[in-house]
Image: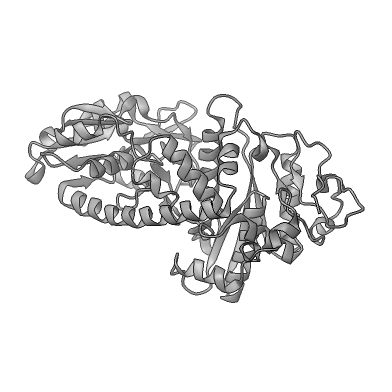
Amino acid sequence: MPRTRCSASPEHSPRWAPSQRPARRSTSCAANFQPSARRCANVPPRCASVPAAAEAATPAAWPVTAGEFAACMTRLGPFGAAPALAVAVSGGADSMALALLADAWARARGGRVIALIVDHGLRPESAAEARLTAAQLAARAIPAQIIRLDNLARGPGLAARARTARYAALAAACAALGQDGAGVVHLLLGHHQGDQAETLLMRAGAGSGPAGLAGMAPWRAAGSVVLLRPLLALPPERLRASLRAAGMGWVEDPSNADPRALRTRLRRAVASPARRAGLSAAAAERAAARRALAGRIAAILAERALVHPAGFALLSPGPIAPAALAALIQTLAGRAYPPPAAGLAALAAAPRAATLAGVRLLPAGRLGVGRFRGGWLLVREAAALAAPVTARPGTLWDGRFRLLALPAGFPAMTLGALGAAGPPLRRASAWPAAVLGSLPALRAEAGSGTLIVPHLGYPDPAAAAAFAVIFTPPRPLAEQE
């Protein structure tokens, strides 16, 4: 049976997966939403893009079983007793299915799940959609928290900026969850086999190297959280089948069907389940090679480099493997991805004073003692440092430094680079000006002159120690994607 569209405004509103009742044309569930989402949650939905009967005719579209999902989670563990998990939920079929599967898995082990719904605030109806999604989950006894992003402006690079803001908000929410302020470490993402195939084609088109062509990693440390993608081996048809079996609807974002979007064209290119499976298998093979490479990189850097908690590094003299140098630069720059290959090989073969991907390579000077004599200092480029941000517990600055504690009684403060105030403080440290200027510093917003530099113990060790600022780059050296 052909699908019917379930939207009052198809150009701007997402479509809620409709009822299977053939005689009734549904209106938007967001418009119908009264006291609860049960009106939508209890209607067996049909896939918004493929007829339900056609999908269900093959084993590839059967619901995901509890045993299958448990096997996916086992490969990402261990999790310990009573696991606490956060699930990033957009309201789409993939993340809604993940929330259901993860909730059942956690409950069976005495644990719990919380859904984190990010409202980007970029469409007028986004707030209503987020509330509807939360109500859908609440009807299944899955608690949800809506996180609204208020600082996204339209313009160039919106998708990348939205992604960065989304992950930062999710990480901050995870840090604030949990008992006794311990936070939730594991954040589950709904990327599936189709997403993996699209990512592979996108990276191939962008000229990615072997690491990028390994696709998205199923497990990745990202600052204070660990990102888990348990669905990477599962096709999207099976996730929608799981929702149908549970009688649960989902939202279809109309932007996913925009033919102008690269992702839409790639999605059509991998519409064949066989092609998706082939690309997924290729990604898995490359991922195994990537893990082996990560082990070699870790061994090289353990011998050749020293990363300081203040966010700079020392490198012993001589050539170094390009992949190892790339990992070191990526960590110091706080980047989600490795630096571009252009210029990297030549710099690794013959290290010299240079700047690459927001990191400066300088002679180690007086810091070059022992195995680092005649070696190199790697430090964040001053021009690439992020602007100051309001200091709150959990604040991440420059993608690398997180403020864990902010003592009571201090005025409103910002967290940013020490900058030009660094050189006058050289008496407090033997570090060169390039390092001092890159250090995180807290300043009073009211201009009272209050200055705290935790890594220098300035103005005094006791006061500085009360401001816990730690170096937490998005990728540890041994976990490069």
- Is 380 situated left or right of 180 in this image? left
Which x, y percent locates residue 171? 51, 49
- Residue 383's x, y, as percent? 35, 24
Vertical relation: 349 (above or below) 353: below
> In the figure, is residue 274 to the left or right of 130?
left
Looking at the picture, tell me which residue is in the foreground, 63 or 278: 278
**Quadrant (top left, top right, bottom left, bottom right) of the N terminus:** bottom right
Is 238 drawn above or below residue 146 in the view shown? below
Taking 85 as reference, is 374 left or right? left
Q: What residue sits 38% from the left and 44% below the top? A: 212
Looking at the picture, does residue 381 appear above or below residue 168? above
* Visual colour scheme: one colour
Q: Is residue 374 visible?
A: yes
Q: Residue at x 67, y 38 (%)?
A: 257
Tell me which residue sits at (15%, 51%) in the image: 303
Q: Nearer the viewer, residue 234 or 150?
A: 234
Q: Quadrant of residue 425?
A: top left
Toward which corner of the image does residue 437 lie, by quadrant? top left
Q: Is residue 220 visible?
A: no
Residue at 60 percent across and 38 percent down: it is 264
Q: Nearer the viewer, residue 148 or 198?
A: 198
Residue that lies at the very extreme toward the right in this rendered image: 23
Position in image of residue 227 (x %, y %): 47, 54
Total of numbered circles in the picture?
Answer: 0
Residue 397 position in % (x across, y down): 43, 38
Q: Name the foreground residue: 97 vs 316.
A: 97
